[in-house]
Image (cartoon, grey):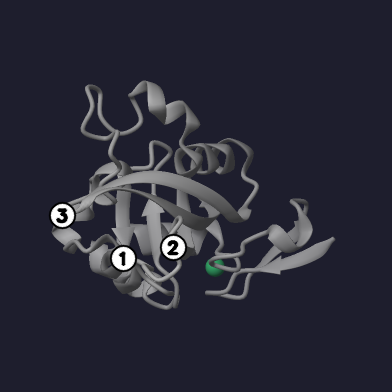
């Protein structure tokens, strides 16, 4: 059992009953009060918060709709903040299925989407996941690519921090999309 302390106000968050070292891998703990303050500020405050992290971090809801992202998150998406806030993760990363009827999260392929399933599991259980391998079919100008993501999740309030630990193109060692 580990004691948990809010990283913002140092308030004792009590004994951590979740899975030991996997708990709070991203924010290392923030109390509900500090989280509420943060989220009630303008969107820019949330981005400043997320910008503390050196990996791409997205704040998403239970449907994997993006609420905010840090600089690194924008860099890997190749999009502007206005384009990704309020957008679904599949649209932001150009998932090849997100253009099908229903869109991201609603097509028959979405049941097998590891990013979606990992976010939803963490949302339901409150248990963080660390470096889960997600193989996503993305669409680029040059064709379709299978891309491997390593993702970590952490629940905070009714939102999820989604960290991208690694992105690599499958079956081509010299064609990394981004080395993080
Ligand atoms: Zn706090």
Whichever of labels 2 and 3 marks the residue nearer the N terminus, that label is 3
Compared across the picture, whether 121 is left or right of 108 comes to right
Q: Horizontal and vertical percent for residue 105?
A: 35, 31
Which residue: 57% across, 74% down? Answer: 7
Q: Looking at this view, is 97 or 21 the one in front? A: 97
Whichever of labels 2 and 1 marks the residue nearer the N terminus, that label is 1
Which residue: 42% across, 57% down? Answer: 36
Residue at image mark 2? 167
In space, the residues marked 2 and 3 are separated at their CA atoms by 21 Å
Tag 2 and tag 1, C-beta contact below 8 Å: yes
The correct choice, above or below, for 136 with respect to 24 in the image is above
Residue at image mark 1? 76
Q: Horizontal and vertical percent for residue 88?
A: 28, 42
Q: Regarding mark 3 in the picture, which secondary structure is present there? A: helix
Which mark is nearer the camera, 2 or 1?
A: 2
Tag 1 and tag 3, C-beta contact below 8 Å: no
Where residue 39 sits, quadrant-wise, is bottom left
């Amino acid at each position: 059992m580990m004691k948990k302390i809010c990283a913002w106000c140092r308030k004792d968050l009590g004994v951590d009953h979740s899975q030991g070292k996997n708990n709070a891998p991203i924010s290392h703990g923030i109390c509900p009060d500090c989280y509420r303050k943060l989220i009630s500020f303008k969107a820019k405050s949330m981005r400043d918060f997320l910008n503390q992290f050196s990996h791409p971090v997205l704040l998403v809801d239970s449907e994997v709709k993006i609420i905010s992202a840090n600089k690194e998150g924008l860099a890997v998406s190749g999009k502007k903040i206005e384009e990704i806030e309020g957008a679904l993760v599949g649209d932001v990363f150009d998932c090849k299925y997100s253009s099908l009827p229903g869109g991201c999260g609603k097509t028959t392929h979405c049941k097998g989407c590891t990013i979606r399933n990992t976010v939803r599991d963490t949302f339901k259980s409150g248990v963080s996941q660390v470096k889960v391998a997600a193989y996503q079919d993305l669409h680029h100008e040059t064709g379709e690519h299978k891309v491997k993501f390593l993702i970590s999740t952490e629940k905070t309030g009714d939102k999820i921090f989604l960290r991208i630990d690694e992105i690599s193109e499958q079956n081509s060692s010299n064609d990394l999309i981004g080395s993080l």
